[in-house]
Amino acid sequence: MAQYSRVRGSVALLRLTNPPVNALSAAVSRDLERAVRSACADSAVRVLVLRGHGGTFCGGADIRELAGLVDVPFRVGVSSLVALVDAVEAAEKPVVAAIEGVALGGGLELALGCHFRIAHGQARLGLPEVTLGLLPAAGGTQRLPRLVGFPAALELVATGRDVSAEEALALGLVDHVTDGDVEEAAVEFARRVADEPLASRRLSTRPPPRPADLDTLLQVALERAQRRARGALAPVACVQAVRAAATLPFTQGLQLEQELMAALLPSNQARAMQYCFFAQRIVGKWSLPGGANWRNSPARAVSRAAVIGLGTMGRGIAVSLVRAGIPVVAMETDEKQLRVVTAMLEREAAKQRRSPDSYLQLVQFTLERRDLGDADLVVEAVFEDLALKKRLFAELSSSCRPDTLLCSNTSALDVDALAAATRRPELVVGMHFFAPAHVMKLLEVVCGARSSPVAVATAMQLGKRLGKVSVAVANCPGFAGNRMLKPYVEQASFLLEEGATPQQVDAVLEDFGFAMGVFRMSDLSGLDVGWRVREEAGLAGPTVPPGESARRRHGCRYSPLADLLCEHGRLGQKTGRGWYLYEGPGGRAATPDPWLHDFLDQYRRRHGLRPRRIDQQEVLERCLYALANEGFRILEEGVAAGPEDIDTIYVLGYGWPAHRGGPMYHVAAVGLPAVLSRLEHFRRLHPDVPQLRPSALLRHLVAEGSPPISRWRELLKGLRSQL
Ligand SMILES: CCCCCCCC/C=C\C=C\CC(=O)SCCNC(=O)CCNC(=O)[C@H](O)C(C)(C)COP(=O)(O)OP(=O)(O)OC[C@H]1O[C@@H](n2cnc3c(N)ncnc32)[C@H](O)[C@@H]1OP(=O)(O)O
């Protein structure tokens, strides 16, 4: 696990070995500590170099142990890593960390215990514990501020952001960066520093940082943390721990750090966030009904891609491809959009510290379909209109190479209908990106009935290459994410009819942790998007059958409120008015609109609805349980493979707070019998709302004694045919 060998005379090389990411389990930490001690005791050794096996330094403490998934006594597990870092720092001989791949979490804390740090140019360093609901608790919150200064340390610990080797060098986090062999560079470096005094290199002995504007820095960090994840405990604990580095001696700071960790570690929030971590890895292990899966289906190489349509989605997709180094042919008739993409690419290049040309030269703009002929994969991102997309797919099928994959960025339309318009249905898949596509980490890969394993594997792999988490789902209206959104939005509208206000509903959802409530979100996306979909579905506008009552469709309850706002020209932020009022068209600050409240009053009077007082619990339960209930239906139909897929989609694509795990995790945490009973209660009160009828799968799981969520995936394999 931790090999110790002597190389080149007086330099001892220690190799941390625990594939795939050299995680510091309790056993590995103890082993490495022993290796450090025996190297120090070896009179022939003057200096130690510590590196990781297999091209990576260390991915941190073993999350399985922290999450309680592996049976290691809690105190043994956590204290081993603390003891290791302390032993490394206290060593009487210099220890040089040779960092390549990643040094994350406990891995970076270990490097901070070393006296010198050398990094490879491609390495990434960071303390991502906050994303797991934790804080760095092997001294990271106390040592980092003493090394890189208080403001930088506060930002890195509270956000969990990782940095490149170049940025690490600028911050003073590493002493040297090499683009050559990191071990060679570290051994050379080690020989030079072998006789240097170590006192000033032990970060724990350095004086605490004393920023003059401490209170302001802390206040700003707390406000940012609250904005990013309202109600999350870990960012607040991170800020408190880093504060201690400036206000307490090292040992007391360390003590506080460990106390805060002791409170976070068993918390529901940490459990939920660690579930999200593993869920995002589970979803990559996809399989198709015919037996093809991630192991047996190799992806095809994508060395050239094409994007059709450079509207909001197409632009983001093109930028993501270029950022991943993939040359793109971009087809768009509107010159204004070309200028916007060019500006976006220049901004991205600046962010990545690259020259603008290095990005711009990867894009070729065109008006001619024949220029797409050479692409390995085409992503269509034109207007959301099935007839238009079918025509386009038929043309692409004739004009592209016979082996080119044809992908659609549709967010809800029938991928099988698009495939049927081509002569290569097996090479058609949905690639549903989320706006803004160059920022959002989610990709829904929509597998059509005839999509081949190679098409699915290529789309899944491409998503990963673009830095996204790809989730495979089956084809159905709205796929997984948007399909679940429908009952959620509907409940919110029904609540308005019954007496709630948009700001009341939004406040409850935002207190739960959503970045934005349903109405603010809908104003941001534009109310016309859903309006068009409802018109196409015969629910709104001229396509509604004559004589249909305003509040009923197909025998079920319907709320026309959003349609009525659209008819009044209130399309959301873009028109300066929607569910809220904005400063003007394109404005972003939402204020309650007296007009809307009059409008709701009149609407209720017109339809004989007596407004009632609605409490927070009802808002939350009706919105969230209706959404999760649709999630159960998606699972029973096999549209998604397991709860982890749905939860990943909601956390990464829809602003569901990660510290609540995702909708399926949330209802499992609340307790399935309680959720079932509330749905039954709401169903009795609203018998004309089918989305409140508990799904067969929810009933089945309750009947089976509510197995833990970790077992649902396996259970579903055997269940689907019986439901
Ligand atoms: C009484 C109270 C006292 C309190 C004292 C407390 C003292 C505790 C001291 C310190 C605590 C430190 C906390 C930590 O260090 S938490 C861990 C922080 N590290 C991370 O968050 C990094 C997580 N990993 C990643 O970001 C990536 O995996 C990465 C390392 C970048 C590699 O990415 P990639 O190449 O894409 O590979 P995968 O993500 O697919 O991962 C491959 C498999 O490895 C598993 N994995 C990854 N990291 C860990 C880990 N740290 N622990 C365990 N397992 C890990 C991952 O799950 C994949 O496996 P599988 O596919 O089977 O799921």
Image: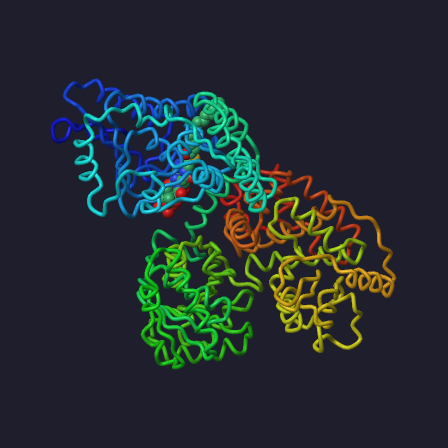
Residue projecting furthest to the front: 212
Q: Is residue 71 visible?
A: no
For the residue pair 698 and 396, the one nearer the viewer reads as 396
Provide residue 125's location: percent of width, then percent of height. Answer: 36, 41
Q: Is residue 118 left or right of residue 561?
A: left
Q: From what the image shows, is residue 293 above or below residue 704? A: below
Where is 270 relative to 612, above or below? Answer: above
Q: Tell me the residue at 69%/55% (across/down).
A: 691
Q: x, y (%) of residue 320?
A: 41, 61
Q: Is residue 151 left or right of residue 172?
A: right
> Which of the two residues, 580 or 609, is positioned nearer the viewer here?
580
Residue 619 visible? The answer is: yes
Percent x, y for residue 71?
Answer: 44, 27
How many labels were placed on the picture? Answer: 0
Q: Is residue 610 above or below residue 529?
A: above
Quadrant for the N terminus in the image: top left
Q: Nearer the viewer, residue 601 or 667?
A: 601
Nearer-the-camera pick, 94 or 704: 94
Residue 63, position in %: x, y? 43, 35
Query: Which residue is located at x 53 percent, y 33 percent?
Result: 237
Q: Residue at x 31, y 21 (%)?
A: 90
Ligand 1 is found in the corner quadrant, namely top left
Q: Residue at x 69, y 44 (%)?
A: 676
Figure quadrant of residue 330: bottom left
Say how the picture is coloured: rainbow
The single residue placed furthest to the left in the displayed view is: 9
